[in-house]
Image (cartoon, rainbow, N blue to C red):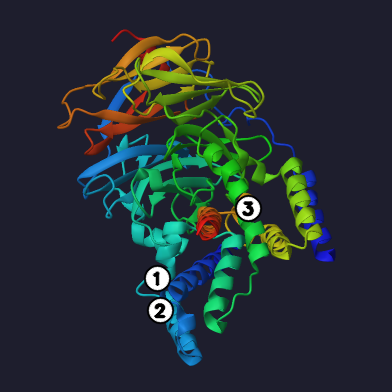
Amino acid sequence: MSSVNAVFGLSGCALFSLALIATVLRLQRLPVRVRHAVMLAAALALLVPLGDLSITAYVRGAIGDLSIPTLVLAGGACVRQLIGRTVIGQADRRALCWILAVAAAFLYPFALGLTPFDPYALGYGSIGFVTALLFVTLAAWQRRRYLVVLVVLSATLAYLAGAYESRNLWDYLIDPLAALYALAWLFGRALGRRSVEVADTKTQLV
Amino acid sequence: MVAAALAFAGLYARVLTAPAPGGFAFPQTPARAASSPAKPFFSGELLPNSTTASVHSAAAAEISGGRLRAFWYGGSREGASDVSIYTSVYAPREGSWSPEHVVVNREFAQRHLRRYIRKLGNPVVGRDRSGRLCLFFVSVSVGGWAGSAINEMVSDDEGETWSPPRRLITSPFFNISTLVKGAPLQFSDGAMGLPVYHEFLGKFGELLRLDAEGRVIRKTRLSWGKSSLQPVIVPRSATEAVGLMRYAGDPPDRILVIRTNDGGAHWSEPVKTELPNPNAAIASVLLAGGDLLLAFNNAEENREDLSLALSADFGNKWRLVRKLEPGSPPAPVSEYSYPWMMQDQAGDIHVLYTWGRSRIKHARFNRGWLESRP
């Protein structure tokens, strides 16, 4: 099982690295064939071992195994850079980012020792935690936020299958990179909205 | 919709069918001598170290034939990339240690863990319920000790050969900041207990429960905040245990104590004992007969005095009984620290500790020596 865990872990880190490379290089500005060639070359560079380890193994050493939201967002970023249009709608992305931000605020401060309460321990098996997750999923379904539903279901199935070394459900649902992305995205949207409002006000004054 | 129903049915089934956690397995070692020879006995020797300039953090387990297998880490300096985990075997009849050899080095660890490893750290060793030796060791991929994670290797042949290491996942934050120092213990449901501590944003202890595959299946917080670490857990029944912890907070610098009465499900808040602690590791063992023995640095300022104290009331009151260090000859560097203590099935007590950072020292004695006048 440990080798299966390693395959999943390394694949996730490779996908994240590819998304990072594609986004930094802004591949979608290049011709389609060049995009594919760059991604193929990057994948080879990431996965082919140099000595004992591949570059992906170094990435895995630094950030660990990645949660399903990170993989979904990374996959979305790769596809966007490859085909030139986004596959994750704004409303879906906003809903996912809000849920990730709230989950991060609940999880990290307490899991890092701020209080005697450890929400991370709930991830080893808690009826309350599973029920809360069920309600979030049902609410997302009812509001047609299918990306959230997809992420929760994928994370649940990966957890039940033991895809990673972790037996804690939290590790499939969130990681610090997903949390950082969500906070940055929400912050960026809030800033963008504020600057539009300021511009509108100036226009009206003129 | 069907997929969602199945997925959540699976989640509920896993939670509802999980067995209730068991209490402590007691006694932790199945056969222990009821009494030791009355004649006081003490021996002390340095473990072999033919290759490394710096050694630290010894641990040991009794293996077949009444022998001891010790582990420690050594390299050019603490935190260097050439640090490896070493082992040596003690034969009590000969009173000597075998030449040390490497159990795991950085390259071996990263090859099997499939991730970059920058350095290795503290090892601890214990037995699971099926009798296998389980070696846990710290590794770091990025940063200092705050970036630590724990790995486990298992041996079916008393430490002659080992499984490849596997990673324990213990924290949601990049799985960093978890270290080991205290001895593992057993639970009655077959799970293994591993006292761990964190030192990233906070310094606090936790008790992990591991299944037979070495996966973390539950954990309990022992303390919180920024001042307690390196918990040592000593059960004395299926429900009752005491925990002793290193202190890293404001003065007065004292060893911390915590207690549980429900098999480790809940723990009392840490309370300062009367014993000093210079922000240094401690070790404790429940002796045959019920007394609690503690090895600790008996000072608030430094690690130059390594002493032993006994408690007849399970850690409420302590009586200083012996001083292990400084002995003669003194170490080149006056530091005697990181004790590991155990009682073997013959009743002898063993303390292994860092001797001047350059060697591991082994002190072997019996209850008679402990109680006799120095």
Q: Nearer the viewer, mark 2 or mark 3?
A: 3
- Name which quarter of the figure residue B92 lies in: top left
Q: Amino acid at mark 2?
A: Ala
Residues at discs 1 and 2 in contact (Cβ within 8 Å):
yes
- Under tag 1, what secondary structure? helix
Q: Are marks 2 and 3 on the same chain?
A: yes
Q: Earlier in the sequence, mark 3 or mark 1?
A: 1
Q: Amino acid at mark 1?
A: Ile
Q: Which residue is mark 2?
A: A45
Q: Earlier in the sequence, mark 1 or mark 2?
A: 2
Residue A2 or residue B36, whichever sits in front? A2
- Spatial distance from mark 2 to mark 3, Cα to Cα? 35 Å
Residue B214 or residue B13, whichever sits in front? B13
- Spatial distance from mark 1 to mark 2, Cα to Cα? 7 Å
Q: Chain of mark 1?
A: A
Q: Chain of mark 2?
A: A
- Under tag 2, what secondary structure? helix
Instruction: Give residue A142's position: percent from left, percent from top.
Output: 81, 58
Question: Which label sits on residue A98?
Answer: 3
Q: Chain of mark 3?
A: A
- Name which quarter of the figure residue B268 lies in: top right
Q: Earlier in the sequence, mark 2 or mark 3?
A: 2
The N terminus of chain A, quarter of image: bottom right
Residue for point 49% across, 19% down:
B257
Relative to B56, B36 lies left or right:
right
* B178 in relation to B271, above or below: below
Residue for point 36% across, 34% down:
B93
Instruction: Give residue A65's position: percent from left, percent from top.
Output: 52, 60
Q: Which residue is mark 1?
A: A55
